[in-house]
Amino acid sequence: MAPLDFAAEWQRKKEQVEAALERYLPPEDAYPPLIHRAMRYSVLAGGKRLRPVLVLAAAEAVGGEAERVLPAACALEVLHTYTLVHDDLPAMDNDDLRRGRPTSHRVFGEAAAILAGDALLTLAFKLLTLCATEKGLPAAAVVRAIDEVADLAGSSGLIGGQVVDTLTTPDEMDGATLEYVHRHKTGALYRAAVRTGAILGGASEGELRALTAYADHLGLAFQIVDDILDVEGRTEVLGKTAGSDRRNRKQTYPVLYGLAAARERAAALGAQAVASLQDFGPRGAFLCGVVDFVLRREF
């Protein structure tokens, strides 16, 4: 078997997702056009597409077909984008730049940005249903995936992390609370992406447990690297305002533990993520490559 060309495979999956997003999003001129322009503006602004790529890769790792889980991959991306649109609002992080462009509320106004985020969240669940109605996957697996995403995107997952992050003062944010925020606000969508792909791909319960451990380690590692990049990165590379955590007096891993310790923790989590895939053999090669990408990324 030829060695995996990770960069080429990543690009192939990313292009597959981009084409599907273009197809699944409402057209700009659909009435009322303002909301559809706002939706497309944020989703099609680019980005790594890491979460949808993980949906495809997790499905393939358990013997599923990427094409059949493509609507779910797009669902995770539009869900992620909704969180960014709302996170950038003045009531949250009040950011002006996202993916190298002015944030949604700066272009369309706060009301339209809020509604665009709401519309994207709703669209995510519509897209998940297409795995059954369009792609012919078993209804029971699709219902289970919808249940997973709803839990992980809700108050016990992503929203719970956002609430704790928003309402906890810097003086109250200790290490345990920060890890809760990172594992929920960021990590929940990694868990949702990997578990959704695995469930729809036909994973056994053992495979699902291993992939869940992988996702949990990867999600926390990603956010720690994000914390580091906020300190060391440049705005023109990141595509968002560097130093925003410091400006907003946010507690992060580098602030609490220092940059060296933060890097060590991210590396250890990456090693744990790779170890979780040991029973997958070559089927886990791409997912191992994702870990390396996350640890080495500059944006």
Image (spheres, rainbow, N blue to C red):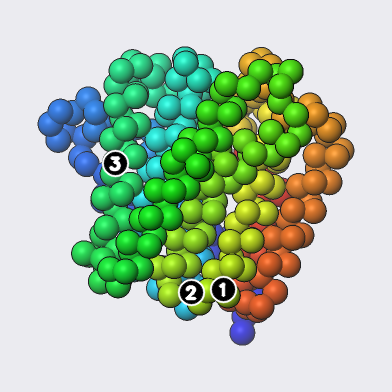
Residue placed at 76% from the left, 47% from the top?
A: 266
SS of the residue under disc 2: loop
Q: Are marks 1 and 2 in contact (CB under 8 Å)?
A: yes
User: Quick check: 9 above or below 191?
Assistant: below
In which image quadrant can residue 255 be found? top right
**Chain-order first, disc 3 or disc 1:** 3
The correct choice, above or below, for 207 with respect to 236 in the image is below
Nearest to the observer: residue 212 or residue 261? 212
Q: Amino acid at mark 2?
A: Ala
Residue type for callout 3: Thr
Looking at the picture, how far across and down is residue 295, in whole percent? Answer: 71, 49
The residue that label 3 is drawn on is: 122
Q: Which mark is residue 203?
A: 2
Q: Which secondary structure, mark 1? A: helix
Quadrant position of residue 299: top right
Q: What is the distance, in whole Å, between disc 3 and disc 2 at their CAs?
A: 27 Å
In the image shown, does 12 or 179 lie closer to the viewer? 179
| Residue at 81% from the left image edge and 42% from the top image edge | 263
Is the N terminus in the top left, top right, bottom left or bottom right quadrant?
A: bottom right
Q: Residue 282: x and y, percent?
A: 63, 78
Which residue has dot 1 on it?
Answer: 207
Q: CA distance from mark 1 to mark 2?
A: 6 Å
As measured in the structure, the alpha-carbon distance from the residue carrying label 3 to the one carrying label 1 is 30 Å
User: Residue 149: x, y in percent?
Assistant: 42, 51
